[in-house]
Image (spheres, rainbow, N blue to C red):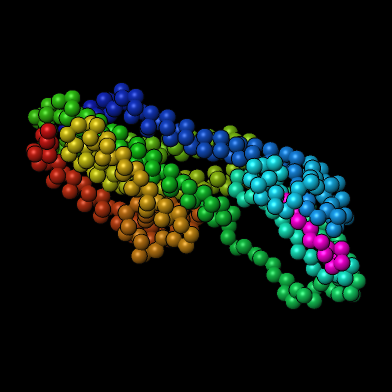
């Protein structure tokens, strides 16, 4: 045990001096999450305000068929009407952003209005980017114009509109605020935490395996009084530690971003602090420790097998994409933690974290996930020890 601690101290001292490792353990997670929470939210808000405040250019084809509608739209704030286009020009003018939207009023509009018939207006718009906001703005203008007309027709024919609404449905959501908010961010946090854990463990694993082989220090360590098991155990613990610490610094960055971001309403901050309280954090970390050991065993095996640091890096790089697959599956609608998927590596941790954040975790499923994690962690470490103990692997060159 003493020799294992000696290995741990030696590896920690070497890694702390490595700027790249410290960057991916501390700076990257502590900066990227505040940027995502603060920077992206501010950028989104800025874009929304810009789109809402900009002058809407609307083309109306057939304006003579309903002068009242045209005049109503003209009176709206931040709206410019263009009446010089033909129907054939509408699509190209919207695509090249000369106009934002267009309305085609049919030539039978006057006649149908006088007979209280329905008129089909064509509303041209372009979906995507900020154009969805343009569509909503024009829809609201049209609704404001149509509402008095609809009311007048009900009164004209002495019709109570409730006759056509036999049921009044009142939706009552019994979910707690934590559950509603947690389900929103619950798909995002596990994704970030697992990636941080993996990337935080990857660079120490590269250095403690392939890096030491290149520098020629691995042979020196193996000839020390410490056994191979003690050496590997020390390396496992160090790599796992860096993986978990990446997540911890990510959490610190997230808490800082939430408290310092003026764009987030106080009630949302209160819910976020509840979600990121002592119990949820403890439960999430209890899942991260074994998954970090799993990553460490897997990554160290690759690092020891590789001939050079560069080869190990080229093998591990695509694994970042590979582990995203089960995480993305966990983000799909309708995918929840169940006994059938509680034994699928990475996916079960992602789903369990989602439930922890939402406050809906089943203790039976939590312990099943923990049992699964301990099994796969123990298995991966046993395979890694057997694999790395072979001299042809260690001295492969």
In the image: residue 57, left or right of residue 178: right
Q: Position of residue 367 (x, y in %)?
A: 35, 58
Q: Quadrant of residue 269?
A: top right
- The reply to whether residue 200 is in sight is yes
394 or 221, nearer to the observer = 394
> In percent of the image, x 62 and y 50: which residue is there?
127
In this view, 379 is above or below 171? above
369 or 104, nearer to the observer = 104
Q: Quadrant of residue 225?
A: top left
Query: Which segment did they paint magenta?
Result: 102-113
In this view, 195 is above or below 121? above
Q: Is residue 109 magenta?
A: yes
Q: Position of residue 331 (x, y in %)?
A: 45, 54
**The N terminus lies in which quarter of the figure?**
top left
**The C terminus lies in which quarter of the figure?**
top left
Labels in figure, total: 0
379 or 104, nearer to the observer = 104
11 or 210, nearer to the observer = 210
In the image: residue 62, left or right of residue 24: right
> In percent of the image, x 8 and y 38: which residue is there?
391
Q: Quadrant of residue 343?
A: bottom left
> In percent of the image, x 43 and y 48: which residue is there?
190
Q: Is residue 355 magenta?
A: no
In the image: residue 267, left or right of residue 279: right
- The reply to whether residue 6 is in sight is no
In the image: residue 232, left or right of residue 270: left
> In percent of the image, x 54 and y 56: which residue is there?
179
Q: Position of residue 310 (x, y in %)?
A: 24, 32
Q: Position of residue 80 (x, y in %)?
A: 79, 42
């Amino acid at each position: 045990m003493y020799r294992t601690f000696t290995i741990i101290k030696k590896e920690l001292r070497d890694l702390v001096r490595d700027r790249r490792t410290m960057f991916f353990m501390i700076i990257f997670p502590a900066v990227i999450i505040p940027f995502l929470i603060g920077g992206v939210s501010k950028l989104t808000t800025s874009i929304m305000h810009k789109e809402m405040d900009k002058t809407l250019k609307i083309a109306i084809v057939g304006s003579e068929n309903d002068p009242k509608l045209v005049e109503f739209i003209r009176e709206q704030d931040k709206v410019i009407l263009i009446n010089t286009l033909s129907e054939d020009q509408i699509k190209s003018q919207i695509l090249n952003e000369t106009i934002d939207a267009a309305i085609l009023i049919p030539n039978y509009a006057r006649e149908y209005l006088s007979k209280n018939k329905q008129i089909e207006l064509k509303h041209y718009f372009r979906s995507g980017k900020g154009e969805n906001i343009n569509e909503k703005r024009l829809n609201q203008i049209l609704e404001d114009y149509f509402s008095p007309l609809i009311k007048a027709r009900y009164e004209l024919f002495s019709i109570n509109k409730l006759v056509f609404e036999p049921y009044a449905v009142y939706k009552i959501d019994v979910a707690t605020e934590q559950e509603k908010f947690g389900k929103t961010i619950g798909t995002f946090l596990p994704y970030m935490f697992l990636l941080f854990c993996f990337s935080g463990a990857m660079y120490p694993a590269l250095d403690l395996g392939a890096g030491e082989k290149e520098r020629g220090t691995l042979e020196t360590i193996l000839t020390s009084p410490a056994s191979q098991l003690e050496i590997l155990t020390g390396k496992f613990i160090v790599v796992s530690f860096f993986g978990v610490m990446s997540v911890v610094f990510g959490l610190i960055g997230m808490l800082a971003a939430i408290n310092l971001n003026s764009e987030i309403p106080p009630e949302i901050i209160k819910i976020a602090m509840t979600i990121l309280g002592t119990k949820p954090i403890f439960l999430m970390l209890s899942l991260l420790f074994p998954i970090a050991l799993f990553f460490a065993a897997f990554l160290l095996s690759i690092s020891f097998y590789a001939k050079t640091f560069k080869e190990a890096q080229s093998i591990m790089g695509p694994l970042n994409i590979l582990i995203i697959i089960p995480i993305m599956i966990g983000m799909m609608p309708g995918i929840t933690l169940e006994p059938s998927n509680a034994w699928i590596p990475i996916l079960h941790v992602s789903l369990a974290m989602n439930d922890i954040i939402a406050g809906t975790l089943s203790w039976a499923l939590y312990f099943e996930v923990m049992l699964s994690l301990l099994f796969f962690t123990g298995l991966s470490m046993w395979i890694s020890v057997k694999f790395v103990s072979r001299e042809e692997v260690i001295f492969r060159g």
